[in-house]
Image (cartoon, rainbow, N blue to C red):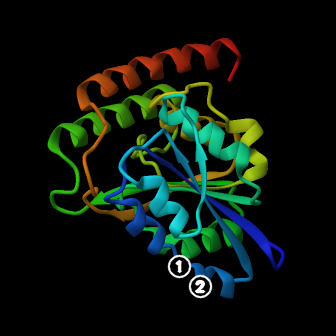
């Protein structure tokens, strides 16, 4: 159980997310979390946005950390190093993930004794392009086949986990492969589960390059499989 006043850190990587960061932060049900006896810190790790993303986040009382080094995974590593909470929650800054479900996910994590929750996106019509959906399907199938884990959405970016398991699940990858690697390490190392969530169309322009990033992530799955197998995992 979490003690009264326990801190929850919500980490959000951003790059040119002025269209989505306000909605993302405003949807976080701060008052509901406080009624649960929790304190909250919102950490936005920004890659050098020039569109006002940082200013919007600061106006909404988020702690903004500038990370000039590129990479999705690099942003999260920096964010985790600044996070002080006993529980860490992750979100994208584009308004696509249901921030309003954070209290329910934390409650589920604590009451059921899980260490790590990842989410399976149940996409609303038009919220995910066909190429991206197909790529995610194949990457998830490959992850399940290689690592023998029950994972349906290897690329989802919303997770809820206990900070003290980071030493077991921290990925090596600094890029997009970070997302699949943290899930794989979690499912192999700590008590983990995947739960379905609604997923909305992103606000603003996507930085994802579906074909290039998909191929890179696929190759990394095999590299990670070889490394873990060599290490006896």
- How packed mark 1 is, by other alpha carbons closer than 10 Å (few <14, some 14-19, many 20 or more), is some
Residue 92 appears anywhere in the view: no
Query: Residue 121's quadrant in the figure?
Result: bottom left
Residue of label 1: 29
Q: State left or right for residue 184 relative to residue 128.
A: right
Q: Are marks 1 and 2 in contact (CB under 8 Å)?
A: yes
Where residue 56 appears, as percent x and y from the top left, is 45, 62
Secondary structure under badge 2?
A: helix
Q: Residue at x 62, y 25 (%)?
A: 172
Q: Position of residue 187 (x, y in %)?
A: 60, 42
Residue lying farthest to the bottom in this orientation = 35
- How far from the left and from the top, in percent, is residue 210? 25, 32
Is residue 59 toward the left or the right of residue 82 in the image?
Answer: left
**Pointer 2: what residue?**
32
The mark tally for this picture is 2
Q: Please say if 194 is above or below 41.
A: above
Give SS at disc 1: loop
The circle on residue 57 is none
Nearest to the observer: residue 108 or residue 44: 44
Give residue 107's quadrant in the image.
Answer: bottom right
| Residue at the image position 77 percent from the left and 56 percent from the top | 84
The answer to whether 143 is drawn above or below residue 88 in the figure is above
Q: Is residue 88 above or below residue 136?
A: below
- In the rendered image of this protein, does residue 194 appear above or below residue 144? below
Which quadrant of the rendered structure holds the C terminus?
top right
Q: CA distance from mark 1 to mark 2?
A: 5 Å
Can residue 113 be spotted in the picture? yes
Measuring 44% from the left and 34% from the top, which residue is drawn there? 144
> Dot 2, how many residues are within 10 Å of its Cα: few (below 14), some (14-19), or many (20+)?
few
Judge by depth and name the residue closer to the eye, 161 or 227: 161
């Amino acid at each position: 159980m979490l003690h009264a006043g326990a801190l929850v850190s919500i980490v959000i990587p951003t790059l040119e997310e002025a269209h989505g960061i306000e909605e993302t932060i405003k949807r976080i049900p701060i008052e509901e979390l406080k009624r649960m006896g929790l304190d909250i810190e919102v950490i936005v790790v920004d890659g050098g946005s020039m569109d006002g993303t940082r200013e919007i986040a600061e106006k909404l009382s988020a702690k903004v950390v500038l990370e000039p080094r590129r990479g999705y995974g690099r942003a999260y590593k920096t964010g985790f190093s600044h996070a002080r909470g006993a529980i860490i929650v992750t979100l994208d800054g584009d308004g696509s993930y249901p921030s309003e479900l954070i209290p329910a996910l934390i409650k589920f994590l604590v009451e059921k004794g899980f260490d790590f929750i990842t989410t399976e996106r149940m996409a609303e019509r038009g919220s995910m392009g066909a190429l991206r959906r197909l790529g995610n399907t194949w990457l998830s199938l490959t992850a399940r086949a290689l690592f023998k884990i029950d994972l349906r959405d290897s690329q989802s970016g919303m997770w809820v986990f206990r900070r003290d398991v980071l030493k077991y699940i921290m990925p090596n990858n600094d890029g997009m492969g970070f997302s699949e690697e943290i899930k794989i390490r979690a499912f192999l190392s700590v008590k983990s589960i995947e739960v379905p969530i609604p997923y909305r169309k992103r606000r603003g322009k996507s930085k994802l390059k579906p074909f290039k990033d998909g191929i890179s992530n696929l190759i990394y799955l095999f590299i990670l499989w070889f490394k873990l197998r060599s290490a006896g995992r």
